[in-house]
């Protein structure tokens, strides 16, 4: 592809609030207010300059169309897609096709979690062919990991190394839920209580409150703004149907995201080995191993070896989930999906906290979803448009 | 009810203290009715002869309206399993075993395995169906064969 239209779109500002298990005195609307004001201030834009939005919240169930009135009632493009990367693809497509020029995407969640006795409400499927058997998100992903471990001999220690690496990143990020809570070792992961085999507690994502957002615009406008621009250079989505409604059969869902990644790499004229930062979705440690295989960084079954020896650490060849990810930074509503894009921007624009800044970060890959969820979306970024 | 913000009402305590029962639809009722009669039913396509589960309105393999309900042997193998220590809700007595069963007829389903210890289970092991009463419903579970 000689000319990839995605490269005419750039991210020019991102913002995260503090992330925490509970943000006392906050609700998801107060957090959105902080995000919107901060994004406008950072980008030196006025609300009138934003001619498209996709703003939503989890607890209030604020829909983008309702959110329009929060920025004044002027005519604007309005997004519908609620999931991070997919929402950015939708907005970028609107910009490429001339429907809008500058779009703000933001989401938040605060003020939920009333039933600590049960798994978090959204992780419980209501589908009759999974609910009756006591399945929930972690168990669905565990069924994928167990099959991989049986086929390829993937050891639990490899999962633990992934979890330890990502959780230790979160220790260094001031906005992370687990900031300053200490570095985590693989031994600690393996010693934590079992949730559903093979996942120990520290292999699993946390639950959080928080908000975040970003502004994307045309590459041309980005240059005029003198903002730090990070370009979208490729993207794709793979969906296999509704999550948690049927058995996650490894032979059918283990590769999910492969088609999307192939298309994204082709658009970007990049290969897996060209990626400097891997902001892979990490609901459970095993998913990092899976994605390296599915996206072609290594062969099927080689993921456990691939992630070893510090290769996925900040100073490694392919650093993953550099802000601490869903295991340590935050896991709030659908925000955590957007946060994969936000951290990719922060890495490529040199805005990460010092211990987490990847040196020579010129390209990044962000992903959402996973095997157990039957979908995977990917997006590639570069700090310069790749032209040919 | 306000359109601004969803209801903050929590699920009733009852929802957490009672094991979930299926809520059959027109599409799925034959499967659950079969369980009550001690039969494991799945859809089979009379055009391409593939099995279809969970139930679909038409065959997703050959896109024809040729699905009929067929009784299966209830025998299969463990495709994957997980021992669950944190239950879906407090109604589930932990630990319990959730699994994907690969049925001999070539279709897959999620279920529970009833076994004295998880240590006696392995992937690809043979299992057979057993039906467990739950409230008004009957749930298909599996035991080592
Ligand atoms: Zn057919």
Image (spheres, grey):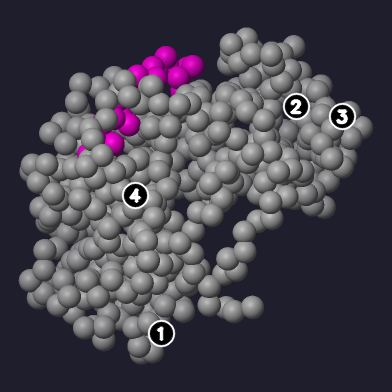
Magenta-colored stretch includes residue A153: yes
Q: Which residue appears at 17% of the width and 59% of the height?
A: A230
> Is A94 situated above or below B41?
below
Q: Mark 3 and mark 4, same subunit? A: no
Q: Mark yes or no: residue B58 visible.
A: no
Q: Give me the C-alpha separation between circle 3 and circle 4.
A: 46 Å
Q: Give me the C-alpha separation between circle 4 and circle 1.
A: 28 Å
Q: Give me the C-alpha separation between circle 3 and circle 2.
A: 12 Å
Residue identifier under label 1:
A69
The answer to whether the beta carbon of the residue marked 2 is less than 8 Å from any atom of ligand 1 is: no
Q: Mark 4 and mark 1, same subunit? A: yes
On the image, the x and y values in percent for residue B57 come to 75, 50
- Give the number of the disc on residue B141: 2
Residues A30 and A372: in front is: A30
Q: Give me the C-alpha separation between circle 2 and circle 1.
A: 52 Å
Q: Mark 3 and mark 2, same subunit? A: yes
Residue identifier under label 3:
B39
Q: Secondary structure at mark 3?
A: loop
Q: Which portion, as a residue range, is magenta? A: A148-169
- The 10 Å Cα crowd at callout 2, few under 14, some 14 to 19, many 20 or more, is many
Farthest top residue? B120
**Contact (Cβ within 8 Å) of mark 2 with mark 4:** no
Tell me which label, 4 or 1, sits earlier in the chain.
1
Residue identifier under label 4:
A330
- Of circles 2 and 4, the one toward us is 4
> Is B4 situated above or below A31?
below
Q: Which residue appears at 22% of the width and 71% of the height?
A: A38
**Contact (Cβ within 8 Å) of mark 4 with mark 1:** no
> Is A38 situated above or below A151?
below
């Amino acid at each position: 592809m000689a000319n990839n239209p995605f490269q005419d779109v750039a991210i020019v500002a991102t913002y995260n609030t503090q992330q925490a298990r509970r943000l006392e005195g906050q609700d998801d609307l107060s957090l959105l207010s902080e995000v919107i004001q901060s994004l406008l201030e950072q980008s030196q834009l006025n609300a009138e300059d934003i001619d498209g939005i996709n703003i939503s919240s989890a607890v209030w169930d604020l829909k983008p169309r309702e959110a329009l009135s929060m920025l004044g009632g002027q005519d604007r493009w309005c997004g519908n897609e609620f999931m991070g990367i997919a929402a950015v693809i939708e907005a970028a497509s609107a910009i490429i096709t001339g429907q809008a020029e500058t779009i703000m995407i933001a989401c938040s969640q605060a003020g939920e979690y009333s039933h600590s006795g049960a798994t978090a409400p959204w992780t419980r499927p209501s589908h009759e062919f999974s609910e009756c058997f006591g399945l929930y998100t972690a168990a669905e992903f565990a069924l994928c990991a167990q099959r991989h471990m049986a086929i390829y001999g993937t050891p639990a220690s490899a999962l633990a190394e992934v979890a330890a690496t990502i959780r230790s990143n979160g220790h260094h990020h001031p906005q992370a839920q687990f900031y300053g809570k200490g570095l985590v070792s693989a031994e600690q992961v393996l010693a934590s209580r079992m949730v559903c085999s093979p996942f120990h507690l520290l292999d699993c994502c946390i639950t959080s409150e928080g908000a975040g957002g970003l502004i994307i615009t045309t590459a041309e406008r980005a240059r005029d703004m003198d903002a730090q621009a990070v370009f979208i250079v490729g993207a794709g989505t793979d969906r296999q149907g509704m999550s948690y409604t049927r058995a996650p059969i490894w032979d059918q869902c283990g590769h999910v995201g492969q088609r999307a990644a192939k298309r994204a790499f082709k658009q970007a004229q990049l290969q897996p080995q060209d990626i400097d930062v891997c902001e892979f979705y990490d609901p459970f440690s095993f998913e990092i191993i899976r994605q390296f295989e599915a996206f072609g960084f290594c062969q099927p079954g080689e993921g456990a070896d691939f992630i070893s020896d510090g290769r996925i650490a900040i100073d490694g060849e392919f650093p993953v989930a550099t802000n601490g990810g869903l295991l340590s930074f935050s896991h709030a509503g659908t925000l955590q999906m957007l946060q994969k894009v936000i951290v990719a921007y922060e890495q490529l624009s040199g805005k990460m906290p010092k211990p987490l800044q990847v040196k020579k970060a010129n390209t990044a890959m962000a992903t959402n979803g996973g095997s157990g969820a039957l979908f995977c979306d990917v997006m590639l970024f570069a700090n310069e448009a790749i032209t040919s | 009810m306000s359109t601004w913000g969803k209801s903050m009402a929590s699920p009733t305590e009852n929802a957490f203290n009672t094991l979930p029962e299926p809520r059959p639809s027109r599409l799925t009722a034959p499967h659950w009715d079969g369980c009550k009669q001690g039969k494991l039913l799945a859809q089979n396509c009379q055009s391409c002869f593939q099995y279809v589960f969970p139930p679909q309105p038409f065959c997703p393999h050959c896109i024809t309206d040729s699905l009929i309900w067929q009784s299966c042997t209830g025998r299969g193998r463990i495709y994957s399993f997980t021992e669950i220590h944190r239950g879906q809700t407090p109604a589930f007595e932990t630990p319990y075993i959730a699994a994907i069963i690969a049925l001999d007829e070539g279709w897959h389903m999620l279920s529970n395995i009833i076994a004295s210890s998880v240590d006696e289970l392995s992937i690809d092991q043979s299992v057979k169906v057993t039906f467990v009463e739950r409230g008004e419903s009957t749930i298909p579970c599996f035991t080592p064969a």
